[in-house]
Amino acid sequence: MDKDLKILIVDDFSTMRRIIKNLLRDLGYNNTSEADDGDTALPMLKTGKFEFLVTDWNMPGMDGLTLLKSVRANPDLCNLPVLMVTAEAKREQIVIAAGAGVNGYVVKPFTAITLKEKIEKIFERLEK
Amino acid sequence: MSSKETLEISESSYLTEAYMKRLQSLTVAFESRDEAQISEIVGELTTLRESSLYQELGMLTREIHDAMSTFGNDERIAQLATEDIPDAKERLNFIVTKTDEAAHRTMTVAEETMEVMDSFSGKADAIRERWAQFRNRELSKDDFIQLSNEITQFFDSVEPESATVNSKMTEIMLAQDYQDITGQMIKQVVVMVKEVEEKLVRLVAISGLGDVSLTKKEVISKSSDGEKAEGPQLPTADKEVVASSQGDVDDLLASLGF
């Protein structure tokens, strides 16, 4: 897997962004940027040539589900792999996220191993 | 309650008597085919019916009025609205700030510790490599003297660097002191919320607007909208509705072909 992969981390809590950033660095991914909601993230995604998106769902401004839908609706971004890392744990919500085209879904609180597994699984499937 | 019942009984027996009297006169009027009399009695019956309705309505209004004014006179409610609730909001905001600070402080120190440990194991790695060369007789005399100096330096650094890591661990532990303060504050807010809950239940009972015993499930199903983020669920949440672990999430996604 390409360790130079350009990753955007979107979460309204700076502590959570920092945790995800640290875990990704531990996994060898150092090329990360941060945004605090969908409204900030979307313009970054459009110009930043990101290769992977890790986003929360519940955020002020544009939430993660809307961001996911906007990504899938944009011809330049529609193939971007998206991992949702969120506290939203209702079955109904997970089904909706899956329907909107999420590539992986991690519920908070999560472990470093879970995050690693999900990321690896996403890229394994993409390489197939 | 008992005085109200007695009142109702005496009123209803008075009403029965009044109705009976009118009905008897009505029978007499029918027998004598006195149309004027019939229409007069029917009119009286209607008035009787209406006035009893008005009486009941009046009683109900008085009851509601009394209950509402007791409720309105409760100074505690005014205090809750003007002092306790703003105070609770402030406390909750303080808790957000405090936990945020503690998390960042902990992460900063953890990152610094990792740096110390990285450089420490880096130095040990370099020495081990050179030591292996020495054991294989691949090191010149000058190189050995240099290695020997490096080893001395490394040993000398063990103690101060351990002390650094130790003090950083202590700092991480101290950063957890937020739990004490925020825990106490959350408990205070819980007490306040409980009081508001009791008052609200009373208000609902007085207004007769709804069934207070409405089950939690009914309330939740009414407010549910799958697309809307709801934030974390309680660990006690209904397992049929909420995925309780990452394993549950994975199973659900697998069932959808993921």
Image (cartoon, coloured by chain):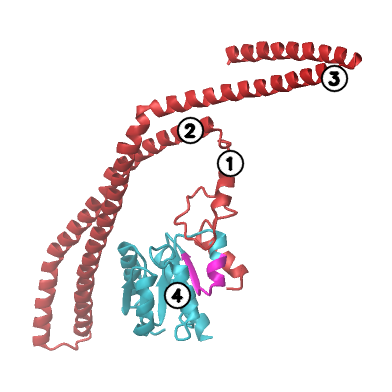
Chain colours: A cyan, B red
Do marks 1 and 3 share a subunit?
A: yes
Q: Which residue is mark 4?
A: A119
Choose mark 1 or mark 3, whichever is in front. 3
Name the quadrant containing residue B111: bottom left
As displayed, is residue B199 above or below residue B18? below
Label 1: chain?
B
Q: Which quadrant would the C terminus of chain A be assigned to in this image?
A: bottom right
Of label 1 and label 3, which has the lower sequence position? 3
Provide the chain ID for the residue under circle 2.
Answer: B
Q: Identify residue type, mark 3.
A: Glu
Place of residue B15 in the rendered image (x, y in percent of width and height, measured from the top left)? 71, 14
Q: Residues within 10 Å of mark 4 (few under 14, many from 20)?
A: many
Q: Position of residue B151 (x, y in %)?
A: 13, 74
Return the disc, 2 or 1, that comes first in the chain's sequence.
2
Q: Secondary structure at mark 1?
A: loop
Task: Look at 36% across and 66% down and name the residue there.
Answer: A11
**Residue B195 vertical position relative to residue A87 in the rendered view, above or below:** above
Mark 4 or 1: the one toward you: 1
Q: Which residue is mark 1?
A: B215
